[in-house]
Image: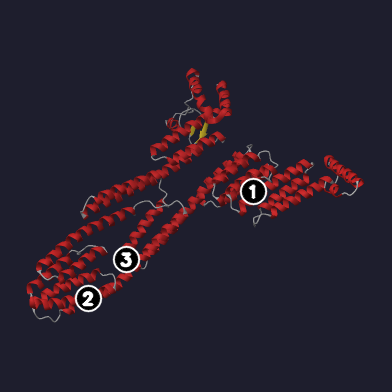
């Protein structure tokens, strides 16, 4: 059309038209040379789409290589166009997935790979992998995309070999004491891969890799815990101070207790890291405290020297009360700056009291007595800066009082204020200790246990606020601490019960169908969300009942459980079957009955089976019923 538009004569117009019609007909007839041109143009378009992707990943190149191989083998213009269109779509999705780190594009890329796949079973597998990618983290989704690109280029035999090789790699990592269990998982997986679709082959591989991974993770966690315990023990080595050592040992003991509940290497490392930090803090505090104590003794000696040369015994007794009060303040001081201030104030108080004593002996003596009583308020208590400030200010005000009445009034006001502040400080302190009992963000406790712990803490805090007795507060805290500890221990026990139940469920039947996997998956989730051992047992029993029905529908009369026993293909639960087996009767255990009663039971369960295993499964079951 462009050439016709530029033609300057009717003769040229006719020539261009005839030539174009001939070329178009050659394309329609797919004559020699035309397909080659189309193929080269298609490959060029695909290369341009690849060049737009800014990544070091080899995935786009693998897609381009597959597309070009299929274009070279194409025998029609339609096929070439189709491959080119699909390949450009895949590369466009992959650009967003890799360049923009879009997880949805990762899923789209996997789905669109069906367009260049030569395997009839790939679409189902790719849909499944795309769904998994959409629910996974970005990095895991990219791993699935990489695997999907590899799978669509493989024959069924090669596809299976790749999966088996992946399992072998994990199998090789199994520890000696886990080798037998790992080999069993591997052998069962390989056996289950025979004569099944690519999707079901992949699902068998997934389950096996999960189980092998659990064995490996268990080994890694177990080894990490042993190493962690050794590292924790080293934290106490070399500590000579008994007090510091006791604190460090307490930190280590609590860390070792936390190790019991740890389920990952990361958790274990965090526990050791936190314990090491706490021990270092205790050691530093002890070192700083030792230096501070030496300073305190120096300042207290200076205070003693202030009244050393006083000869009037009555005056000396009065001044000694001021000195003793200042020495008590020195004991509570947290810095040398504070000690200097206390010493300076004591010097001024002694000077003023000595002058006042000569004028008003009774007032000076009363002030000294009140200061002594104020000092005794702090005996044996850990006080906040606010409480210490109340005592300190009262001492200053008492020394400035002009009459005994004023001094007593200042004292009484200070005592009332001090008691109120001290009780509030105790409330705050115990509530903070209670908050420390709460599970942190990295806790592996189940939600129900966390809720119970938080409820216990909340109620304890409410009770703390209702009392002003320090002893009562301590009892409330101690009881809450015991309750939280028991809840954590029970949760840990429940986790083990859940783990055992899930393992028993997964090994309950050798039948490997989509319906079986749905039952196992659904009841695994239920067991994991259970809040009591009774719930776990009920869910396990319900699941076994459904699996027995599926076994019966498939014509399987028994399945091997994890204890080596057998369960029949009846509606009885696995527990009932195992109980019957243990009676010592050599007759094959079965609750399947003959005659009218059995027929009625089977008919009654058909409706449930249609929902549970689908129309196809129900049809199989009806055939089984007819046979019976």
Q: Considering depth in this image, is 195 or 344 the residue closer to the camera? A: 344
**Closer to the observer: label 3 or label 1?**
1
User: Which mark, by number, is residue 236?
Assistant: none
Measure the C-alpha gap from mark 1 to mark 2: 78 Å
Left or right: where 102 falls relative to 276: right
At horizontal 79% and vertical 42% (from top left) the residue drawn is 77
Disc 1 to disc 2: CB gap under 8 Å? no
Residue 236 in sight from this viewpoint: no
Q: Residues within 10 Å of mark 3 (few under 14, many from 20)?
A: some
SS state under label 2: helix
Measure the C-alpha gap from mark 3 to mark 1: 61 Å
Left or right: where 120 falls relative to 451: right
Does residue 623 sit above or below 284 in this rendering? above
User: Which mark, by number, is residue 343?
Assistant: 2
SS state under label 3: helix
Q: Residues within 10 Å of mark 2 (few under 14, many from 20)?
A: many
Q: Which residue is mark 1?
A: 93
Looking at the image, tell me whether mark 3 or mark 1 is earlier in sequence order.
1
Q: Residue 623's x, y, as percent?
A: 58, 23
Q: Which residue is mark 3?
A: 244
Q: Residue 9's x, y, as percent?
A: 91, 48
Q: Considering depth in this image, is 590 or 381 the residue closer to the camera? A: 381
**Closer to the observer: label 2 or label 3?**
2
């Amino acid at each position: 059309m462009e050439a016709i538009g530029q033609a300057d004569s009717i003769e040229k117009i006719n020539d261009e038209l005839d030539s174009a019609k001939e070329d178009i007909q050659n394309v329609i007839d797919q004559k020699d040379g035309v397909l080659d041109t189309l193929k080269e143009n298609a490959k060029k378009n695909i290369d341009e789409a690849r060049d737009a992707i800014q990544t070091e990943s080899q995935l786009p190149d693998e897609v381009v290589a597959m597309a070009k191989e299929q274009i070279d083998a194409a025998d029609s213009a339609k096929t070439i166009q189709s491959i080119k269109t699909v390949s450009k779509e895949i590369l466009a999705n992959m650009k967003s997935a890799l360049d923009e780190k879009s997880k949805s594009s990762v899923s789209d890329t996997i789905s669109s790979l069906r367009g260049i796949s030569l395997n009839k079973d790939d679409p189902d597998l790719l849909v499944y992998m795309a769904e998994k990618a959409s629910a996974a983290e970005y990095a895991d989704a990219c791993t699935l995309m990489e695997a999907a690109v590899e799978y669509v280029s493989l024959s069924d035999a090669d596809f299976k070999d790749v999966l088996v090789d992946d399992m072998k790699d994990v199998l090789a990592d199994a520890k000696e004491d886990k080798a037998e269990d790992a080999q069993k998982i591997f052998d069962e997986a390989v056996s289950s891969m025979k004569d099944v679709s690519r999707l079901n082959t992949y699902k068998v591989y997934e389950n096996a890799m999960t189980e092998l991974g659990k064995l490996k993770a268990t080994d890694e966690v177990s080894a990490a815990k042993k190493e962690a315990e050794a590292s924790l023990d080293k934290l106490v080595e070399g500590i000579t101070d008994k007090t510091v050592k006791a604190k460090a040992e307490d930190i280590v003991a609590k860390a070792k207790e936390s190790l019991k509940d740890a389920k990952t290497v990361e958790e274990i490392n965090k526990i050791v890291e936190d314990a090491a930090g706490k021990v270092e803090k205790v050691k530093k505090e002890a070192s700083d405290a030792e230096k501070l104590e030496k300073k305190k003794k120096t300042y207290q000696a200076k205070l003693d020297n202030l009244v050393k040369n006083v000869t009037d015994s009555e005056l000396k007794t009065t001044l000694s009360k001021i000195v003793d009060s200042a020495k008590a303040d020195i004991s509570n001081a947290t810095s040398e700056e504070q000690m200097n201030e206390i010493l300076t104030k004591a010097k001024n108080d002694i000077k003023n009291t000595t002058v006042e004593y000569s004028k008003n002996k009774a007032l000076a003596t009363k002030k000294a007595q009140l200061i002594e009583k104020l000092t005794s308020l702090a005996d044996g208590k850990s006080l906040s800066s606010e409480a210490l400030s109340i005592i300190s200010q009262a001492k200053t005000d008492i020394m400035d009082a002009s009459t005994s009445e004023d001094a007593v009034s200042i004292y009484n006001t200070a005592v009332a204020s001090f008691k109120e502040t001290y009780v509030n400080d105790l409330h705050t302190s115990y509530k903070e200790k209670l908050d420390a009992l709460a599970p942190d963000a990295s806790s592996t406790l189940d939600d129900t246990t966390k809720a119970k712990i938080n409820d216990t803490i909340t109620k304890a805090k409410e009770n703390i606020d209702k009392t002003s007795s320090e002893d009562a507060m301590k009892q409330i805290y101690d009881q809450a601490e015991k309750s939280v500890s028991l809840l954590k221990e029970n949760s840990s026990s429940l986790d083990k019960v859940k783990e055992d139940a899930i393992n028993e469920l997964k090994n309950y039947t050798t039948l490997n169908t989509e319906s079986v996997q749905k039952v196992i998956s659904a009841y695994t989730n239920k067991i994991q969300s259970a809040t009591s051992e009774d719930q776990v047992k009920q869910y396990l029993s319900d699941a076994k009942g459904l699996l027995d029905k599926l076994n019966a529908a498939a014509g399987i009369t028994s399945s091997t459980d994890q204890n080596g026993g057998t369960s029949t293909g009846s509606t009885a639960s696995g527990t009932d079957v195992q109980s019957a087996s243990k009676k010592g009767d050599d007759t094959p255990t079965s609750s399947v009955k003959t005659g009218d009663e059995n027929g009625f039971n089977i008919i009654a369960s058909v409706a449930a089976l249609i929902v549970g295993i689908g129309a196809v499964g129900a049809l199989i079951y009806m055939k089984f019923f007819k046979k019976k």
